Structures are given as structure tokens and as C-alpha cells.
Amino acid sequence: MKEKKNVLQGTLALMVLKTLDVLGPLHGYGIARRIEQISGDLLTVNQGTLYPVLLKLEQEGSITSEWGASENNRKARFYLLTRSGRKQLQAEARNWEQTAVIMRRFFAVKAEDLP
């Protein structure tokens, strides 16, 4: 049985931006489920964690929102990536790639490699 992990606040914003970049306009529940699905159900995204991130991204101008009808015909707020959000996503992705390279180097070091 896999242990589910909570998503870290900073990483959740990046996951939201990437999800909207790939799928286009989506409501909060759909964003949360997609992130969980992509993680192989290793992550849990709850409303208390997601909605503050969506609000912050909207206030920053990275996303915008509009009301619409969900798949089951309920009123829902749909979030869309803005041009500014797309630029932010590209910059954040580069930062994460650099961080991953640095961390791989640290994990690859063995005691016998040290001078």
C-alpha cells in the first residue's frame, strides 16, 4: 500500500500552472484530481491546500478565473493560465530542473569520492 504525501505549498503552485498549461481551463476539483492522478495517487490535494494557492496565483496574475458549468452541470469556477502565468511556469520549471541536477550530484557522492 502506497503512503500518500501532502503536496508542499511551493510545488503545488507549479503543479497547478503545469496542469492548466496542459489541460486548459479547469475547475479546482479537476485540478486536484489531475495532480493526484499524475502523481500515481502518491499525493493528496485537499481544498484547504489548493484554494489558497489558486487565490494567490490569481492575485499575482498568473491565472484568471470565470464561472461556468461543471461536467455534472453544477456551477463551478474555472481557472485559466495567463500569458504571465506561462512565463512564470517556464521560469519555475528551469529552476526546478537546476535544483534536481544539484540534488542528483549530492546524492551521487560517496565517502570514497571525497579527497
Image (tube, grey):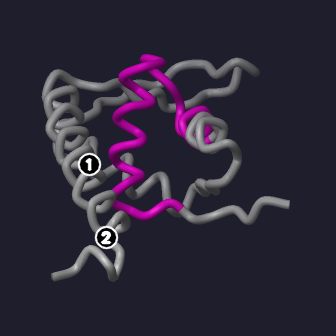
Q: Work out whether residue 32 or residue 5 is closer to the camera in this orientation and state it.
A: 5
Residue in view at x 33 percent, y 57 percent: 104
Left or right of 72? Residue 63 is left
Q: Hey, what amino acid is under mark 2?
A: Val
Residue 88 sits inside the magenta stretch = no
Q: Is residue 25 left or right of residue 89?
A: right
Compared with 73, 109 (above or below) is below
Q: Earlier in the sequence, mark 2 or mark 1?
A: 1
Quadrant in which residue 65 is drawn:
top left
Q: What's under tag 1, amino acid-wise?
A: Trp
Between the residue at mark 2 and the residue at mark 1, the CA separation in whole angstroms equals 20 Å
Which disc number belongs to residue 15? none
| Rendered location of residue 41, percent (x, y) | 70, 47
Report x, y in % for residue 66: 40, 25
Which quadrant does the C terminus fall into?
bottom left
Q: Secondary structure at mark 2?
A: loop
Nearest-to-viewer mark from 2 and 1: 2
Any magenta on residue 11?
Answer: yes
Instruction: Identify which residue is drawn at 59% across, 54% down.
Output: 45
Q: 73 or 11: nearer the eye?
A: 11
The residue singled out by tag 1 in the image is 96
**Label at residue 109:** 2
Q: Is residue 42 left or right of residue 57?
A: right
Q: Position of residue 92 (x, y in %)?
A: 21, 43
Residue found at x 38% / y 32%: 18
Q: Which residues are magenta?
A: 7-32
Mark 2 in CB contact with mark 1 (< 8 angstroms)? no
